[in-house]
Image (cartoon, rainbow, N blue to C red):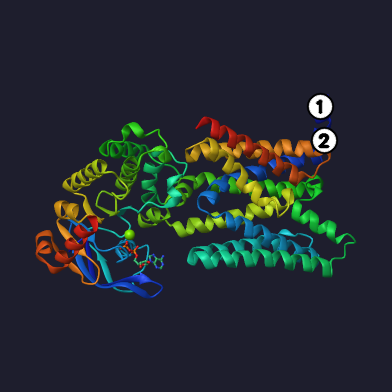
Amino acid sequence: MLFEKLALYMQYPFVRYALIVGVLIALCSSLLGVTLVLKRFSFIGDGLSHVAFGAMAVATVAGLSNDMLIIMPITVLSAILLLKNGQNARIKGDAAIAMISVGALAFGYLLMNLFSTSSNVSGDVCSTLFGSTSILTLTKEEVALCIILSIVVLLIFILFYNKIFAVTFDENFAKATGVKADGYNLLIAVTIAVIIVLAMNLVGSLLISALIIFPSLSAMRIFKSFKSVTVCSALLSVFCAFFGIIISIVAGTPVGSTIVAMDAAVFAVCYIIGIIKY
Amino acid sequence: MSYITVKDLSVGYDGVAVEKNINFTVEKGNYLCIVGENGSGKTTLMKTLLGLRSPLSGQIEYGDGLKKNEMGYLPQQTVVQKDFPASVKEIVMSGFEGSAGLRPFYTKAEKEEAAANMERMGISDLAGRFYRELSGGQQQRVLLARALCATKKILLLDEPVSGLDPLVTAQMYELIAGLNKDGVTIIMISHDIEAAVKYASHILHIGSDIFFGSKNEYLKSSAAKGFLATEKGGEN
Ligand SMILES: Nc1ncnc2c1ncn2[C@@H]1O[C@H](COP(=O)(O)OP(=O)(O)O)[C@@H](O)[C@H]1O
Ligand SMILES: [Mg+2]
């Protein structure tokens, strides 16, 4: 019965598109999540998602046909700034990030209220924050762009995997022995920015951090090597995104929150397994 | 030409010097111990030697075939590393990244060398184990094996025995002395003045008055007398 229903849904292109995009985004965001958590860079993910929201508001107000043209450069630039800030002055950096992220949020909301031509402003805001149904209305071009960017992120991650490990485990040692650690930090920050912009369509800007951080925290409860944590976190993330989307379509719940709720539930399970096992 | 020549060096943070007028040389095969009170700037000096911080003034010259990025490093352990998910193998192999350039994967030769370095540090049986499950002494051996993968020329060790029990500490010192005998130049920061005097060929004492010289010269100096007295007093 359930499977028949699923098979029926799969015949609709929008469902297939949503699943492809959702799984790819979940995969990409979980990969760098491990590094972000271990490097104590989680704050960058959080700050950036708010910046991306502000940028989205600007794009909406400017009435651009392609939002990405504004959102992507602003978010990438902010990633670079936040990284520099966080490294130079630890304590002051935290406050600066809080300021930027809350400021971007307020500014974005203000812009949308003042200039939006839409009749349902709070609906628009709500869907940018918590993810819209837009994942179910993806065009072929959006799906193609998402696939291309995901492949780029995946390639970067695989090609630089060993370097990302070295820089994450011990940045000072890496630098002292000639690894261009600053360059790789930059690469990590820019990649995170790209992932956040991609993921905004899926879960909305407030929930992106969850998508990035939950799977790696779950994996770390159970596994103890970098590789197994990375692989497990990718699998968990893909699993949650896939079934989250299916559930949301079948049960009519919001896509983003359903996926994040799945992630949280999986974390709870992993937490318990971690306690029992060790 | 020496491996490292330091002239009138000042080190510190944000333009404020922690320690000034440091002068010393390190020759190939030396075992230099850096001693001094807590907060006197030993770690800061080591980071400056490694190129992690820039000198406030003065010069550091590298010579005799040693390049700036050919220095192995054993940092003071950070909180982040304590519960980092990583296997012993993953950590040891990461020592090669500095020489790998943009090459994404490790070569067969590198894998064999990593195995040899683990053998040398007596941790071959730990290869499949996980870093956060190891004892403090085992973790230090893993980090030493990683440093050997990066270079065989010189190792800079920042308080390598802090937090280890006496027996493991003694083993660690012997291990380091063995490496030095095999031709690896050692620069070690230590609190343990007795071990410094026992193993080192040269001593650099930093603090209110700076001393640099061979071990025997150090024992006769005034810097040593004051420091040895306070260290002994501190232990009782
Ligand atoms: N990142 C930093 N920024 C500013 N000051 C620092 C920093 N790290 C250490 N210091 C200060 O520099 C001095 C020397 O520190 P350090 O080199 O760690 O001493 P040691 O290793 O000899 O105990 C200390 O007074 C310390 O407070
Ligand atoms: Mg120190």
Disc 1 is placed on an element classified as helix
Q: Position of residue A110 (x, y in %)?
A: 78, 68
Vertical arrangement, residue B102 with respect to residue A89, above or below? above
Chain of residue at mark 2: A
Tell me which residue sits at (53%, 63%) in the image: A86
Vertical arrangement, residue B125 with respect to residue A77, above or below? above
Res. B102 visible in picture: no
Q: Pointer 1: residues within 10 angstroms few (<14), some, or many (20+)?
A: few
Q: Nearer the viewer, residue B28 or A278?
A: A278
Q: Looking at the rendering, in which quadrant would you find the C terminus of chain B? A: bottom left
Q: Is residue A136 left or right of residue B136?
A: right
Please, which residue is most extreme toward the front here? B236
Number of disc labels: 2
Tell me the quarter of the picture where residue A154 sits: top right
Please, which residue is most extreme toward the right here? A119
Residue placed under numbered mark 1 in the picture: A2
Q: Looking at the rendering, in which quadrant would you find the N terminus of chain B? A: bottom left
Disc 2 is placed on an element classified as helix
Q: Is label 2 in contact with label 1 (beta carbons under 8 Å)?
A: yes
Vertical arrangement, residue B31 with respect to residue A8, above or below? below
**CA–CA distance between discs 2 and 1?**
9 Å
Which amino acid is tagged 2?
A: Val
Q: Nearer the viewer, residue A272 or A23?
A: A272
Q: Are marks 2 and 1 on the same chain?
A: yes
Res. A103 visible in picture: yes
Residue placed under numbered mark 2 in the picture: A250
Residue B108: mark in rendering: none
